[in-house]
Image (spheres, rainbow, N blue to C red):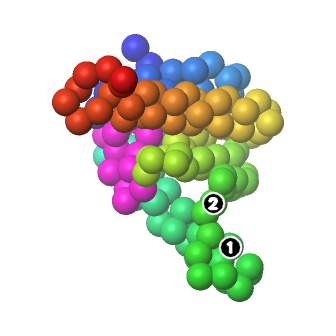
């Protein structure tokens, strides 16, 4: 198994790890709580990544709004390039976020495509669950 569940949505991380040179990934809530992470991270490291990722997202939303001279802005992705590799952060429409790390050899376009694809699948699954209704039955 390549991911550690803290909830039932960590399945989203498995396909991201299939991109060559991807080292680790975390699924988190917008406020920085871990809901899943890959084996390359300890729980403490995953929690640290989640807290930092949440802070980075907030700062980027604030910066984007300031540059646009707007009250608020939604961030579609954040890319951090370092001497060690790339961090890609992609928020979902339902309050979660995927953060993935690839070493310096990762193809950023492939990583971004896979993360965005998984975020879309996560959104589809969330919408399907919401459509069931409050009583848990199938939609009419």
Q: Residue at x 46, y 60 (%)?
A: 54
In the figure, 70 relative to 32: above or below?
below
Q: Residues within 10 Å of mark 2 (few under 14, many from 20)?
A: some
In the figure, 96 relative to 132: above or below?
below
Quick check: 2 left or right of 134?
right
Where does the magenta region start and end? 27-43
Q: Which mark is residue 102?
A: none
Q: Residues within 10 Å of mark 1 (few under 14, many from 20)?
A: some
- The answer to which image quadrant residue 2 occupies is top left
C-alpha distance separating marks 2 and 1: 8 Å
- The answer to which image quadrant residue 37 occupies is top left
- Residue 57: x percent and y percent? 54, 62
Q: Nearer the viewer, residue 89 or 92?
A: 92
- Find numbered disc 2 in the image and state the secondary structure of the residue it sits on: loop
Q: Residue at x 80, y 36 (%)?
A: 109
Q: Earlier in the sequence, mark 2 or mark 1?
A: 1
Q: Which mark is residue 64?
A: 1
Quick check: 94 left or right of 129?
right
Q: Quadrant of the C terminus?
A: top left
Quick check: 79 left or right of 71?
right
């Amino acid at each position: 198994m390549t991911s550690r569940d803290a909830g039932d949505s960590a399945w989203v991380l498995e396909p991201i790890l299939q991109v060559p040179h991807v080292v680790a990934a975390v699924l988190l809530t917008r406020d920085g709580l871990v809901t899943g992470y890959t084996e390359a991270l300890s729980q403490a490291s995953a929690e640290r990544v989640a807290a930092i990722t949440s802070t980075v997202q907030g700062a980027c939303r604030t910066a984007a709004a300031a540059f646009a001279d707007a009250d608020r802005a939604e961030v579609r992705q954040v890319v951090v390039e370092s001497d060690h590799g790339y961090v890609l952060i992609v928020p979902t429409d339902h309050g979660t976020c995927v953060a993935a790390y690839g070493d310096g050899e990762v193809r950023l376009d492939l990583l971004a495509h896979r993360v965005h694809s998984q975020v879309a699948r996560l959104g589809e699954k969330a919408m399907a669950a919401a459509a069931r209704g409050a009583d848990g039955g199938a939609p009419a």
